[in-house]
Amino acid sequence: MTPAAVLLLMLIGLSAGAFGALAGVGGGIIVTPLLAIYFGLPMHQAIGVTLLCVIATSTATSALYVERHVTDVRLGMTLELATTVGALIAALVARQVNRRTLAVLFACFLLYSAGSMIKKAWNSRNVKREEIIPDYTPQNYPLGLAASLIAGGFSGLLGIGGGPIKVPVMYLFMKVPLRVAAATSNFMIGVTGATSAYIYWGRGDVRIDVAAPLVAGVFAGSLLGARFSPKVRSFYILLLLIGVAGWLAVQMIYKLLTGGFQ
Amino acid sequence: MSRQDLAADRILSLTLKAGAYTAFVLIIAGLLLQWATPWGAKVATAGLLVLLATPVLRIIVANIQFFRERDLKYALVSLGVLCIVVLAYFLGIQA
């Protein structure tokens, strides 16, 4: 791999990590399509590499959220019982799914994420951040576990974290404060991603030459993002991320229609 | 939140930080060394393996904490998660 390619991958990782830390949306959704569209990686390999980026974001940012007691470790551990099972099954099945089907599923997920980010941006226009976390007791565990199973499945199949599935369920149905829900979802992604990453790694679907510069960038981006997050309005970051996700979805659909992702 | 929980959070956070920084340093060193020696790629791989091991390490650390706090319910929950992840690891080796 040339120094220029290494540098480019580090920059992609840097922006993915910064997005993850600033907007609370895993940068994973931008890495897979970039690798599949512009680096010509087969979908399975793009997903395998993205899983490592997702684990890196989770590890770097969780260290901070756990330290600040925002993460609900007990809730996270409980839901991980379901996310890991979903991730394991989906990672085993993923090999049987053909590349074009994976690309179609991924494009759908990108559009769904863009939609949920538009909603999040709209809601966060003028709302001040909840500084003090109110007292709460998580409700409705069966629903939370079911949603976690599905989120884990998507993670194992598409290499994403599954935040857009888990966070709304924790917030709306389990009555967990939004900040806690986001931090806890992020915490769970490390273990969930690792579960499927072992399967991808074992099958040789993790390209180390691509993963190493990306992960290094993600670490640096997450740390920078976390440092600047109090100073940056997440609203504008969300708008930028919506634009990028929308653009990548269009590119993926275009490539699918012109017979790509074989 | 109890004082035990606050201490447990600090140890968990330290585990995650140690994993993240170790992986980061190894990967950067590997990336720089890869143009100088054939060892570079191996160092970077070691960094990625540290990254993959960190989530498991944090389950084990949490599990020990729960047992020490005599919080049997969550000790069993974290043990369950650990079992699934270890199963994935062995299935991954066979794949």
Image: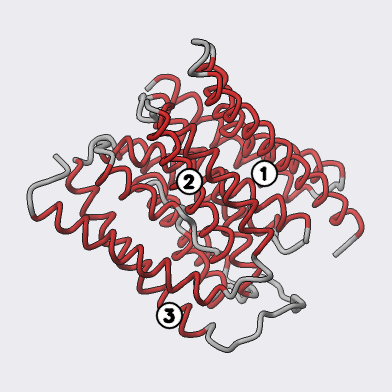
According to the image, label 2 marks what residue? Answer: A13
Estimate the x, y position of residue A65 in percent, counting from the top left. Answer: 71, 58
Density class for disc 2 (Cα within 10 Å; few <14, some 14-19, many ≥20) is many
Q: Which residue is mark 3?
A: A119
Which residue type does callout 2 highlight?
Answer: Gly
Between marks 1 and 2, how big is the CA–CA gap? 31 Å
Is the residue marked by circle 1 packed among few (<14), some (14-19), or many (20+) residues within 10 Å? many
Residue A176's place in the image compared with A186, above or below, is below
Look at the numbered disc 2 and give the secondary structure of its residue: helix
The quadrant in which the C terminus of chain A is found is top left
- Please indicate whether residue A154 sits to the left or right of residue B74 in the image: left
Q: Residue A62: x percent and y percent?
A: 66, 52
Q: Secondary structure at mark 3?
A: helix
Q: CA distance from mark 2 to mark 3?
A: 26 Å
> Which image quadrant for residue B93?
top left
What is the x, y in percent for residue A76? 63, 56
Q: Amino acid at mark 3?
A: Lys
Q: Which residue is mark 1?
A: B78
Rendered residue at 32%/43% (across/down): A35
Q: Contact (CB < 8 A) between labels 1 and 2?
A: no
